[in-house]
Image (cartoon, helix red, strand yellow):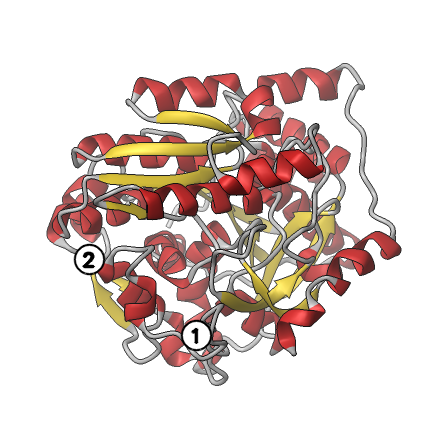
Amino acid sequence: MNIKTKRFLLPENEIPEQWYNVQADMVNKPLPILHPGTRKPLTPEDLYPIFNEACSQQELNQTDSWIPIPEEVRDMYKYYRPTPLVRAYELEKALDTPAHIYFKNESVSPVGSHKLNSAIAQAYFCKQEGITNITTETGAGQWGAAMSYAAKAFGLELAVYMVKVSYQQKPYRRSIMQTFGAQVTASPSMSTRAGKDILTADPNCSGSLGCAISEAIELAQATPHCKYVLGSVLSHVSLHQTVIGLEAEKQMAMAGEYPDEVIACFGGGSNFSGITFPFMRHKIDGSHKETRFIAAEPASCPKMTRGKFEYDFGDESGYTPLLPMYTLGHNFQPANIHAGGLRYHGAGTIVSQLLKDKMMEAVDIPQLETFKAATLFARTEGIIPAPESSHAIAATIREALKCKEEGKSKVILFNLSGHGLIDMTAYDMYLAGDLINYSIPDETIEKYLKEVEPLNK
């Protein structure tokens, strides 16, 4: 094959027909999710009041490695899938690295991010169940935009609680959601008991994903024929996203290479899971034991690098089940960084178990380093990445520069999970020198983690 081939494209008929469920193959399964009232392991039926039944079943499935993708979902995937795998020659040249850098370009979806892979699936399952209304949360707005598009495609009414700081920082993502017909509310709001309680305690609260989740769940439970849908963290979301890695496997084979390292940014785990889990199964079965999997999270929200493995709530008000995960505490209030999609206090249960078992690793990256990496990527590869994706780029650059220092060539694959064309306010601030790094004192993390302890007694 011509080594100068830059884009590796699959035909439409190569879209995966099944999602990959890594839980079934893990040596150590994730610990059970617990009912918040009884503290006993959940059954799928326990989740029915919040989620649609199909996703509830998928959430707790630890036996089936492969889950069929409904034909109607695959038909909608054909609007933008398979997405390209790209060799980043110009970035390699700028770094003067012997590393071979590839990225899976999920920014080509109609809403500009990977989030649509699960939004379509969840909207489909809700429609099949006869649900008419859905609620959700969104951080930077990428999930909200994806769910708004998918809801309209399946004739569902959608209410979105958008984290207030992102509601203010990213008005055009709000506009996208409203263009697709969604109702968008800044969170915390006065429309729910959860929001009122948070604003009473802190009238200037800028919001968090945990808070927005609480509001969305509360509204779903109070609305007839309504369910809640989630864009990250939970296992069924990770499952839907595996179309990314399953395509990337075939495309890496087209390139004649196999990744030594697979990297993605990390908020709750949706795009990291999507790109890594299909490759992870080869580490589990021993055929590619040495592959490294690296999650890149913000230094200002370091749940995997500085958090604690505990049972904790997935939301601020304690409406969700108790999840066994690396957490900073469900009351943790992250700094107002521009990577709004990564401002979440906990990691998904599958990823948390894999990290605990040292099957993967995590790094935390300061905000200024991510924008420096993003700017270099834009100037070399011609794509302005979202602030979230920029964490993966920064981690990739670190690894590529290590290759240069050591004189070793490695194959590095990262997930470009979204474009940054609606994040230009953040780039304006970076270019003007107005962005800063945020550091969290150990005592602050300890304070929030102490509030988790009673849940485990």
Estimate the x, y position of residue 416 in percent, counting from the top left: 49, 41
Q: How crowded is mark 1: few (under 14 residues within 10 Å), some or many (20 or more)?
A: some
Q: Is residue 257 above or below residue 349?
A: above
> Is 320 or 343 nearer to us in this picture?
320
Q: In this view, does 451 lie to the left or right of 159?
A: right
Mark 2 secondary-structure assignment = loop
Residue located beneath label 2 in the image: 69
Q: Is mark 1 on a helix, strand or loop?
A: helix
N-term mark: 1 or 2: 2
User: Quadrant location of the C terminus?
Assistant: bottom right
Q: Residue furthest bottom?
A: 27
Q: Does residue 7 appear in this view?
A: no
Q: Is residue 407 visible to the viewer in this orientation of the structure? A: yes
Q: Which mark is residue 440?
A: none
Quarter of the view holding residue 144: top left
Q: Which of marks 1 and 2 is in front?
A: 2
Picture coordinates of residue 62 (x, y %)? 35, 77
Name the residue nearer the viewer: 11 or 188. 188
Instruction: Give above or below for 97 relative to 150.
Output: below
How far apart marks 1 and 2 lie (CA) works out to: 22 Å
At 23% from the left and 61% from the top, the residue drawn is: 53
Residue at horizontal 55 percent and vertical 72 percent from the top: 354
Q: In this view, does 356 lie to the left or right of 178?
A: right
User: What residue is shown with label 1?
Assistant: 282
Three-letter code for the amino acid on which mark 1 is drawn: His
Q: In this view, does 117 lie to the left or right of 327?
A: left
Residue at screen point 65% across, 50% down? 297
- Closer to the camera in the image, 353 or 432: 353
Discs 1, 2 touching: Cβ within 8 Å: no
In the depicted structure, whether residue 337 falls above or below residue 49: above
